Amino acid sequence: MEKEKTYVEDVDRELYDFRNAEKDVWKVGEGLTPAIVETISREKNDPEWMRAFRLKSLDIYNRTEMVDWGPDIEGLDMDNIVTYVRPNTKMNVDWADVPEEIRDTFERLGIPQAERASLAGVGAQYDSELVYHNVREEVAAMGVVYTDLESAMHGPYGDMIHDHFMKLVPPTDHKFAALHGAVWSGGSFVYVPPGVTVEIPLQSYFRLNAPGAGQFEHTLIIVDEGANLHFIEGCSAPKYNVANLHAGCVELYVAKNAKLRYSTIENWSKNMYNLNTKRARIEEGGVMEWVSGSFGSHVSYLYPMTLLTGEGARMTYTGITFAGAGQNLDTGMKVVHSAPKTSSAITAKSISKDGGISTYRSAVVMTEKAAGSKSSASCESLMLDDISRSDTIPAMDIRTSQADVGHEAKIGRISDDAIFYLMSRGIPEADARAMIVSGFADSVSKELPLEYAVEMNNLIRLEMKGSIG
Amino acid sequence: MSEELLKIEDLSVSADEKSILRGVDLAVGRGETHVILGPNGAGKSTLGNAIMGSPAYTVTGGRITFLGGDLLEKAVNERARDGIFMSFQNPLEVPGLSLTNFIRSAVEMRTGQKVRFFPFRKELLRAMELLDMDPSYADRDLNVGFSGGEKKKAEILQLLMLKPSLAILDETDSGLDVDAVRTVSRGVREFQKDRESALIIITHNAGILSSLHVDRVHILVDGRIVAEGDGSLVDEISRNGFAAYENKA
Ligand SMILES: Nc1ncnc2c1ncn2[C@@H]1O[C@H](COP(=O)(O)OP(=O)(O)OP(=O)(O)O)[C@@H](O)[C@H]1O
Ligand SMILES: [Mg+2]
């Protein structure tokens, strides 16, 4: 029987693991001091409040203990991580003005195609700087702001940013939030004015390209009353031997009766420590939808959190995690119901193979004010062999008797009978496995826009191929 | 006999160290319809599984030749590609894989060619209509939430789409209501129209056979074929049961 014997790490990731020779103009020294933070701040032309914020965050960082729960992050040497790398380019609005080398990188990541597929705007981050940025005119004409955070701080939305920046995720939240507050760089700012529906998704593609470079992009999205937005975040990083850190931060504000869908496909290289913090606050009648596919990275800590603060606020979370050899992915979500008649519905799936560990960690909190609220969670894990691990750690804190909270968890394997059945219809074993795994992921991929669903299926196929032979 | 398609010689099969088939011989020519009858536990499904190549069964002796080549050498999917099909007594459910996509992949494997979507879809819907299947089932997940009868119809649908040269139908008629039995035999008759293809029907009911042309009947008892005959053997078994054959095994 012919088999396509490949190793994801060595062969297939070529598709994503290309890097350009480092040609950075400027790089901060390794390790983190107030002087470095001052330099970053000056270089970024921060307003005074931001400079002070960074220094305060650094102080908190130095006084905060390392995270001591969850997967091991000992391999992460903070002194070794270059926190700030700036590409040889300034902001670009026109694709043709982006330096060729960088353009080539994006081209291979398929960004221009995605744009042609009529996405509203593309903000792509190369290293720590936003190099390419383009908001379709009709979207801008509706009053929608989609820009990089740095320049927005100096414009008419400066006060709005000041009022929202790291208010949902304060630097005191955990050590990496403090680090983020001190050295954050790049990322997006989106504001959708009241009543505006953005018909096509806004997209941002983040990417790391320097050995040992951390990435600390900040995403701030405010969807005003009755407005509607779909934002897509996609990540892919090349592979290096030096430990890489991603400590981004996403803050999402959904006003009364507004709706935000936030979709992510993260596909980090297998040496990445992905310690990303995402949080959303949903007001009365608002709707938050998370769609999340986590691939790659060596270690991930990822728990998007939703604060349902207004009556009738709702959230759904649909996520999938794929952990292969050498990966420990700790993902899940948190939701706090603190208003009446709020609801949350969670569908979490995980796949583990070749010794990979995937853990679903969740917290559902219902305060005294959450009367008439509902939360239901369904977790399914698929184990592709006996050496992999899958755990579910759900926590619940329910302080009202008038709430309805449910959680169900299932762990399964691919049955030999199912493989035999598909093979008996002519489908080779490897394809049969991939089909079953893709089918398992289908409830997540069908929530994604088509080109992302295709990408996710390709990722699953690539990951599956590594396990044959 | 017409041109030989399948030849089984002195086949012994075991599962879980237990010997089930003990020296079975069977030859099937192109265009022929064979029926296998036998009491529960006789080894009928085992025979089908051994031909298809189920990993749950071990061939401990004998040979199976298909189109002149050694079948036992081949992987399950290669047997399917070469033209063998088996309808399952208990078809498996695959969440997230639509019936259409599944059949399309299977057809591509069988033909070695990319399927052109619109003609394919049209043919699929026509076959579903023949089988009284609601068209919405084309987009449903494979067998997920299908009733027992619906699963059996989905098996016949695959049979019609894949056009194998040898189809083994394992109790495709059991658990079906009268109308469904009629529908399934309509599907099987449609398949029989291809005079190049052969059938092995495993059943406990004469019902499905009444409207089908039958060339040869084999009685399998306790792992051995104990009697063979033409279609009239079906009626005899229906009347008298297997008692007369049980001590012959
Ligand atoms: N995978 C298996 N492992 C162990 N024993 C098996 C296995 N499959 C079948 N058997 C045994 O082999 C014998 C024959 O089983 P088989 O399913 O072939 O019978 P059958 O003729 O199809 O019966 P029925 O008419 O009830 O479907 C039975 O005693 C059964 O328990
Ligand atoms: Mg049987």
Image: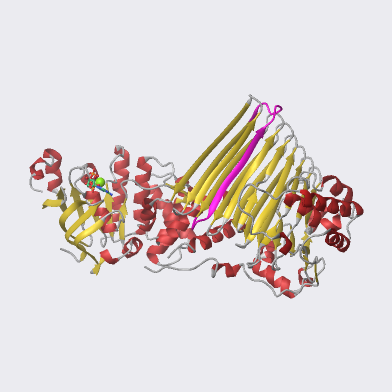
* Residue located 66% across and 51% down the image: A263
Q: Nearer the viewer, residue A242 or A125?
A: A242
Q: Is residue A366 magenta?
A: yes
Give the color scheme: rainbow, by chain, secondary structure or one colour: secondary structure
Quarter the C terminus of chain A occupies: bottom left
Furthest-top residue in view? A401
- In the image, residue A158 sits, relative to residue A395, either above or below, namely below
Q: Visible in this render: residue A223?
A: yes
Residue interval drawn in magenta: A353-373
**A243 relative position to A30: left or right:** left
Q: Position of residue A333 (x, y in %)?
A: 64, 43
Quarter the N terminus of chain A occupies: bottom left
* Residue located 32% across and 44% down the image: B183
Q: Position of residue B140 (x, y in %)?
A: 47, 47
Q: Is residue B79 magenta?
A: no
Q: Quadrant of residue A373?
A: top right
Q: Nearer the viewer, residue B12 or A82?
A: A82
Q: Nearer the viewer, residue B30 or A346?
A: A346
* Residue located 10% across and 48% down the image: B249
Q: Quadrant of residue A239?
A: bottom right
**A355 relative position to B35: left or right:** right
Furthest-right residue in view? A48
- In the image, residue A346 sits, relative to residue A417, either above or below, namely above
**A93 relative position to B89: left or right:** right
Q: Nearer the viewer, residue A435 or B105?
A: A435
Q: Visible in this render: residue A197?
A: no
- In the image, residue A400 sits, relative to residue A2, either above or below, namely above
Q: Quadrant of residue B234?
A: top left
